Image (cartoon, rainbow, N blue to C red):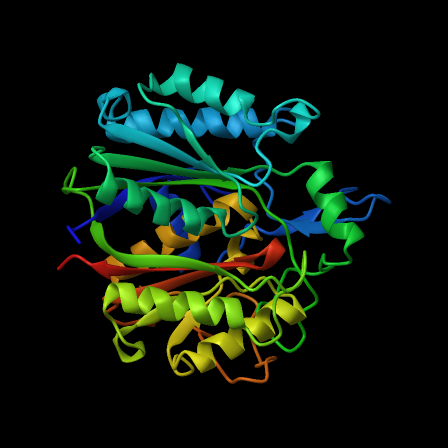
Amino acid sequence: MSPIFMTYGTMITPLGNSVEENFDAMLKEQSGVDFAENSGFNQENWPLGKINSLPAKNRYKELLQRTCKNLISSHGSELFSDENTLLIISSTKADIEALPKDTFASTRSILKEELSLKNKIVIISNACISGVIAINTAADYLQHSDFKKVVVIGIDALTDFIIYGFQSLFALSNEPSQPFDKNRKGICIGEAAGVVILSKEKINEQFHVEYLGGSSSNDANHISGPSRTGEGLFRSINLTMQRAKIKAAGIDFISAHGTGTNYNDEMESIAFDRSGLIATPLNSLKGYFGHTLGAAGLIEVIATMKMMENSTLLKSVGFKETGTTRAINVLRENKQQEVTTILKTASGFGGGNASLILKKCL
């Protein structure tokens, strides 16, 4: 497999409007999750990862437009108008306010207008594994097509539809989420946009990582509940390690999905144990941003790349005491440590599981 490199595009979350702003806030152990007044179906005040500067309506469109402007500012317009560049969108809902019409119509329109794209936009909407799947798909395009660069945008915005939906499943936590902790109560939903750029050659002087491999697997257990044995995630992790030609001992760090629900966190702990990764340091970033759905894989990969760049492992906000049957190595404090090779995992509705492995370019 020819080398595939990846670097930062941009990142917009409740913690900041750039990669640097976000990472600086995370180093200070800040969280973008706060109580949003009257956000529930019965006017409950749910803790959400809400970007307060977005308008009440058309939040998704505004967030996508800001993302495009950031990309042009940091990378120039030529990258996106190049016929050798492909763009992939990862989103679970896109502009949900457009229902019953095509919720991705405005996505295509905004991206074509703002970035002057030459090629058709590829859209991946596969529940909460969308972001990791999108990065894996980008790598496949680079390996098996003539494209030289692939831009991957992960984006989702908060709407009543999403909040009420998770509320109806009794999945929302009435406190900021505590992934893997024994007192965890559920998910906190958030909104964000994150962008990475994959290429056959390094495209600028920014920090790059090398993409070593990725895969997905479906446990076909339940429409919203994961396999209790972690079978799907276990299979994905092991196939990814085979493709990357790395064994468990070669993984320095895991960026876990870690939603803060009983079943997800327990399943992940079992899958990591079965994969020989029980002692590997890991975190969940949901305590910083909430669960940002289609953006989660992207912003969590970006944050993990910054950890690699700065030789710093970030704590898992909200975690205090192990709450899973397998005593995985969840980080309680920030830690200075060289991080060369990382595993990123994701799991989602419909039994989907995905993973990828990245290596620091030395």
Question: Taking 290 as reference, is 272 above or below it?
Answer: below
The picture places residue 194, in percent across and down from the top left corner, at: 42, 41
The picture places residue 81, in percent across and down from the top left corner, at: 27, 20
Of residue 336 and residue 125, the one placed in the foreground of this image is: 125
Residue 20 seen anywhere in this rendered image of the structure = yes
Question: Taking 347 as reference, is 282 above or below it?
Answer: below
The structure residue drawn at horizontal position 74% and vertical position 46%, both measured from the top left corner, is: 165
The picture places residue 36, in percent across and down from the top left corner, at: 71, 45
Would you say 78 lies left or right of 25 here?
A: left
Would you say 210 lies left or right of 289 here?
A: left
Question: Taking 114 as reference, is 336 above or below it?
Answer: below
The picture places residue 254, in percent across and down from the top left corner, at: 39, 68
Residue 29 seen anywhere in this rendered image of the structure = no
User: In terms of image quadrants, where is residue 215?
Assistant: bottom left
Q: How many marks?
A: 0
The structure residue drawn at horizontal position 60% and vertical position 61%, both measured from the top left corner, is: 220
The structure residue drawn at horizontal position 19% and vertical position 43%, both measured from the top left corner, is: 206
Q: Quadrant of the N terminus?
A: bottom left
Q: Quadrant of the C terminus?
A: bottom left
Of residue 28 and residue 304, the one placed in the foreground of this image is: 304
Of residue 3 and residue 48, the one placed in the foreground of this image is: 3
Would you say 71 lies left or right of 126 here?
A: left
User: In terms of image quadrants, where is residue 137?
Assistant: top left
Of residue 327 and residue 277, the one placed in the foreground of this image is: 277
The structure residue drawn at horizontal position 45% and vertical position 27%, both measured from the top left corner, is: 66
User: In terms of image quadrants, where is residue 303?
Assistant: bottom left
